[in-house]
């Protein structure tokens, strides 16, 4: 049994959880829904405009910092950015942009494919860390007193709703069911194997990257 299962708070502080989730949704929503688009109003040279996409994951990261450093929640800090091994975690994150830099990704604007791949990898890594700081760094531990099956469903549901994909007029019931099932499988599979054993948010991000690559290929 992992440390995240043995070192847990006595009960869930639902007020803190609600505060976290309101922040996560409210901060990310303007970027996820396209209400704020800096790529058009403040474009950056050399393809760096792509990095604006990380703002979609800003909410969970802000929620994490507010709960941990401002409200000073007393939940155990069992999961961190680097977990039990800083070296392996850094290597895992670095692999993401390096792999995409080598493989390359086409860009309609004519940007060098390898540079574009590198930027996509950097964007993916930062975005993933921003998300996981909130979902694993705070919420997974805040809900630790809840039995595992129910905890998985709660976090998966909150994660799914946070994406706001159901507000897309082009979405279908089938696509939303698929999205929720993916959220449940991701929460059950990756969070409690990678994060649960290494206590590393970075390892979770690396695993998500390779899983997405394998699903495309």
Image (cartoon, rainbow, N blue to C red):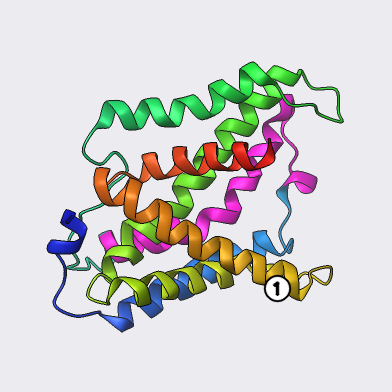
Which quadrant is home to the N terminus?
A: bottom left
**Residue 141 covered by magenta stretch:** no
Q: Quadrant of residue 200?
A: top left
Residue 146 versus residue 135 in the image, above or below: below
Q: State the residue in front, 175 or 140.
A: 175
> Is 38 situated above or below 67?
above
Name the residue rendered at 74%, 71% in the picture. 174
Q: Which residues are magenta?
A: 39-68
Quadrant of residue 62 within the rendered picture: bottom left
Question: Is residue 197 left or right of 49 when viewed as pictured?
Answer: left
Residue 139 position, x and y percent, is: 35, 66
Check the image and name the residue furthest to the bottom: 15
Q: Which residue is mark 1?
A: 166
- Residue 94: x, y in percent? 45, 26
**Is 190 situated left or right of 113 in this image?**
left
Q: Is residue 67 magenta?
A: yes
Residue at the (78%, 47%) spot, across then down: 41
Q: Is residue 85 left or right of residue 161?
A: left
- Number of dots carrying numbers: 1
Q: Please identify the quadrant where the C terminus is shown.
A: top right
Q: Secondary structure at mark 1?
A: helix
Identity of the residue drawn at 32% across and 62% down: 138
Residue at position x 60%, y 37% from top?
Answer: 214
Q: Position of residue 21 (x, y in %)?
A: 45, 73
Question: Which is the main secondary structure of the residues drawn in magenta?
Answer: helix
Q: Characterize the local packing of mark 1: few (<14), some (14-19) or many (20 or more) Cα atoms within 10 angstroms.
A: some
Residue 133: x, y in percent? 39, 53
| Viewer-side residue, 138 vs 31 | 138
Residue 131 vs 82, above or below: the answer is: below
Residue 127 against residue 18 in the figure, above or below: above
């Amino acid at each position: 049994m992992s440390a995240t299962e043995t070192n847990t708070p006595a009960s869930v502080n639902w007020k803190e959880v609600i505060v976290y989730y309101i922040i996560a949704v409210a901060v990310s929503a303007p970027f996820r829904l396209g209400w704020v688009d800096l790529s058009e109003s403040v474009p950056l040279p050399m393809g760096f405009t792509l990095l604006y996409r990380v703002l979609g994951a800003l909410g969970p990261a802000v929620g994490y910092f507010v709960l941990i450093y401002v409200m000073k929640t007393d939940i155990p800090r069992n999961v961190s950015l680097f977990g039990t091994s800083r070296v392996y975690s850094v290597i895992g994150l670095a692999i993401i942009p390096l792999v995409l830099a080598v493989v390359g990704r086409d860009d309609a604007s004519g940007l060098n494919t390898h540079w574009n791949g590198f930027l996509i990898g950097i964007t993916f890594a930062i975005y993933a860390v921003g998300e996981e700081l909130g979902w694993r760094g705070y919420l997974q531990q805040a809900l630790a007193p809840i039995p595992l099956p129910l905890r998985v469903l709660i976090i998966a549901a909150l994660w799914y709703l946070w994406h706001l994909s159901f507000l897309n007029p082009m979405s279908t019931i089938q696509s939303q069911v698929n999205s929720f099932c993916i959220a449940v499988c991701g929460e059950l599979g990756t969070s409690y194997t990678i994060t649960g054993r290494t206590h590393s948010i970075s390892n979770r991000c690396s695993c998500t990257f390779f899983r997405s690559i394998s699903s495309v290929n």
